[in-house]
Image: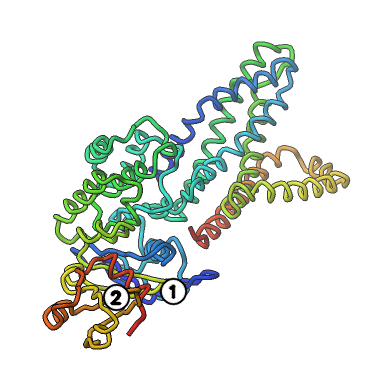
Amino acid sequence: MKGLLIRDLKLMKRQIAFFILLPVVGAVLVAPTGEMSMGFGYITAISGLLGVTTINYDSYDNGFAYLFALPISRRGYVKEKYIFATISSVAVIMAVGIFMWILMAAVHPENGYTFVEFLGNMEDSYVVALTAMAFMLPVFLKFGAEKSRFVILIIAGILMGVMAGVSQMDVLHDIELFGGGWMRVITPVLCLVWLAVSYLISVRIMEKKEF
Amino acid sequence: MLRLENVRKQYKEFEMDITMEVKPGCVTGLIGKNGAGKTTAFKAALGLIRPEGGEITILGKPLCRLSEKDRERTGVVLSDSGFSGYLKVKDLTAVLRNLYRRFDEEYFTGKCKSFGLPFDKRIKDFSTGMKRKLHVAAALSHQADLLIMDEPTAGMDVIAREELLDMIREYMETEGRSVLISSHISGDLEGICDDIYMIDEGKVILHEDTDVLLDEYGILKMTREQYEAVDKRYLLRDIKEEFGYSCLTKEKRFYMENYPDMVVEKGSVDGVMTMMIRGEKR
């Protein structure tokens, strides 16, 4: 597990230019408008993809075969992917988020964007990133990088359709009435349950795979 | 150390059904033409594919019960897979140190240096031979009890191949260790293996001690007349040639003594394999 985590960190290190670019793009999105939502949307999307990127590296040149000939079990591999993705996404959200918050406070102090609001946005961002990641990891493990793009496009299209349908109903309004505070607790719990289910699906996928 | 018993794997146009064993203290070779099933056998032994039947025992345990800790006792070189191409050699030491408790960093870096591998270049930019050298160095760096090496000499020049074979000989100096190795260069196997399995179309067609194969097997070259008259009891395979017949025998001396006019070629892995695959069974 530790060896795999180190390996993924080393692979991430190879993309140092990408990580330097993250706060730069965040600043470009936030500074002119003073809108944090754009910046958080951006880091949510990026952080949700981090775990999946390392799977691409593993599948390159039939790399899985060698990986599982080393002292790495398939369950251990999946566990490491989830741990790595969870940690790397929170690290990116926090680092870029704090940078954007400081930038906001310096460039647009008139907006009165509070630290509590900032923390709320960070939490929302992390929950959405984890939810997306929990969806993408098993898809990437099952279909590989190439086919996964199509599978994700199709499923994302279906989900967008469902969400558009739901937004036409009064369900969201009812949830608001139920109390926004509760949602802050329930959503992360649901996200963790979804993450656990996704992990079990991924383990099953990997245990059935041949290399 | 490693035993595959009636291990069956079915693909669309290929079926493997193999029984073989690597004994403690032995270097066992696996040879066969391209597509014979060597890599499939390796993958089955490593649990990378799921056979339809049979039993695989490795390091005294059924393969399905092999833990990550047990796998530290094996060193592996695969013909079609390796470390992520985006890593560099200098990255690997930290990774291997945390994968193997008995990782010998000094040995690994020393071997990489002696092989002339660049530490600061992405592995994907290495030649085939360089990649093999890297994986061999990694496989030998953690005092494994069993080495499983599929085509470890592929892409290597003569000097590097000799160096690798010396490394395996040195590795085998410690009692109880074993190696399963395949190579398309038969000379590599003749010089290092205690026994050799030949496979063709997914089946073992010959299993023999290397000494026996080299000393007792022979290929008889005969005219048609000689062929008609010869004692055929000890002939294993025949091939009809322009000059007459080539025949494989395990009783080379019998024919040398009784048919002094007959041309008898010394057994070699390549010669025996060609006869076993192309020849007609008697």
Amino acid bearing label 2: Ser
Q: Is residue A20 above or below residue B33?
A: above
- The residue pinned by badge 1 equals B8
- The residue pinned by badge 2 equals B246
Location of residue B149 by image quarter = bottom left
Residue B237 image position (x, y, % from top left) = 31, 79
Q: Dot 2, how many residues are within 10 Å of its Cα: few (below 14), some (14-19), or many (20+)? A: many
Residue B61 image position (x, y, % from top left) = 31, 68
Of tags 2 and 1, the one toward the viewer is 2
Regarding residue A135, the answer to whether it shows in the image is: no
In the picture provided, is B191 more to the left or to the right than B67?
Answer: left
Q: Dot 1, how many residues are within 10 Å of its Cα: few (below 14), some (14-19), or many (20+)? A: many
Which chain is home to disc 1? B
Q: Give the camera-side residue of B135 and A141.
A: B135
Regarding residue A97, the answer to whether it shows in the image is: yes
Which chain is home to disc 2? B
Report if the CB atoms under discs 2 and 1 are less than 8 Å apart: no
In the picture provided, is B3 more to the left or to the right than A77?
Answer: left
Location of residue B235 by image quarter = bottom left
Q: Are marks 2 and 1 on the same chain?
A: yes
Element assignment for label 1: strand
Q: Residue at x 37, y 52 (%)?
A: A70
Q: How many marks?
A: 2
Q: Disc 2 to disc 1, how far (Cα)?
A: 33 Å
User: Which circle's residue, 2 or 1, is located before the other in the chain?
Assistant: 1
Q: Give the camera-side residue of A71 and A115.
A: A71
